[in-house]
Amino acid sequence: MQTVQQHIIERQRQEHPEASGEFSWLLSGIILATKVIADQVRTAGLNNLLGDTGQVNVQGEVVQKLDDLANETILACLGFRDTVGIMVSEEDDEPHIIKEFDGRAKYIVLFDPLDGSSNIDVNVSIGTIFSILQNREGVDSSKVMDHILQPGYRQVAAGYVIYSSSTVMAYTTGDGVHMFTLDPTIGAFRLSQEAITMPAQRKMYSVNEAYRSQFPQGVQDYLDWTKTDEAGYSLRYIGSLVADFHRTLLRGGVFLYPPTKKAPEGKLRLLYEANPLAFIAEQAGGAATDGRQRILDKVPTALHERTPLIVGSKEEVERVASFWKPE
Ligand code: P6P
């Protein structure tokens, strides 16, 4: 049996012997938070935690009670990890400045505390997504946005936790993708799959086709092709990003959230949704683009900016690109 903490320390020892354990200390804060969230999600129906708070967040979305709880849980579990300088949450307009960057505090944690929360009340799988950057050498701590708005290829780690029939964590630090299942009898995430590779192709696409008429013509052409006898694709769409991505990571296929007339830059957020999932996808041998460029090469210009997202098996992402070449 290997827990995620042991795995992280072991990999750090092998891959980054110079690491002083600060990074694994940070990750253990995230692990603690997601164990608490898993318990809150599992018992929400019993503790009057379903439904919304009546508030609307910076995204213009109604805040579910569990969104708030998950957000506060992560802020509390990480706020006292002296290696964290800044935290960025999907739920909060502004970054949380925890402390000045110094020799020890050098990490920026960006997260969507509970993605897909509109599905909570109907017991559909939901998830936490996180991305970790390091502060930029030589840039003053006061230049907060300069430290945050880094392209995704600079991430030092990324991961997600899916709260479903079981609670599963996947993470990467750039040395492959590793997956752990929460063992409720001991309260620890135990290694379930190491060095996961995404199948290079699979005849499965995942998109909300209700918006089809709003998609760029090239995307509509791709969707028409998938329905031909020659193509023979099937469609799976859960409407919860972490669940749709988790299936794509393990079984292959392609997930698309293209631009629509209502959301010309797509609906999903670059910093704490597309970037971490793109890092994981590439580390598993997959690919992620916004239709024009690699997600991880995009230079962010705003904290909550959105991006179109095409992510999944390399060949499937390339096949979408063969139909849709945005001008
Ligand atoms: P639509 C959930 O609200 C979410 O942010 C993602 O989890 C999911 O992939 C997407 O929105 C679903 O959006 O427009 O298909 O309902």
Image (cartoon, rainbow, N blue to C red):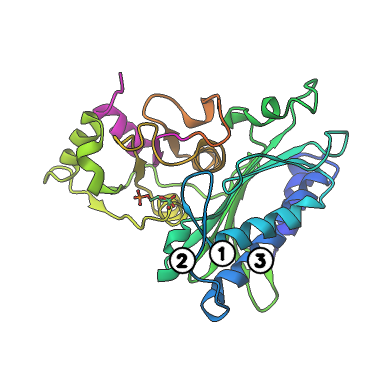
* Circle 3 Cα neighbour tier, 10 Å, few/some/many (<14 / 14–19 / ≥20): many
Ligand 1 closer than 8 Å to label 2 CB: no
- In the displayed structure, would residue 198 be above or below residue 128? above
The quarter of the picture where the C terminus appears is top left
Residue underneath mark 2: 120
Q: CA distance from mark 1 to mark 3?
A: 14 Å
Disc number placed over residue 35 in the picture, else none: 3
| Mark positioned earlier in the residue sequence (3 or 2) | 3
SS at badge 1: helix
* Circle 1 Cα neighbour tier, 10 Å, few/some/many (<14 / 14–19 / ≥20): many
| Residue positioned most to the front | 54
Residue underneath mark 1: 66
Which mark lies nearer to you, 1 or 3? 1
Q: Amino acid at mark 1?
A: Leu
Q: Quadrant of residue 193?
A: bottom right
SS at badge 2: helix
Which residue is pictured at 66% across the width and 31% down the height?
148
Q: Amino acid at mark 2?
A: Ile
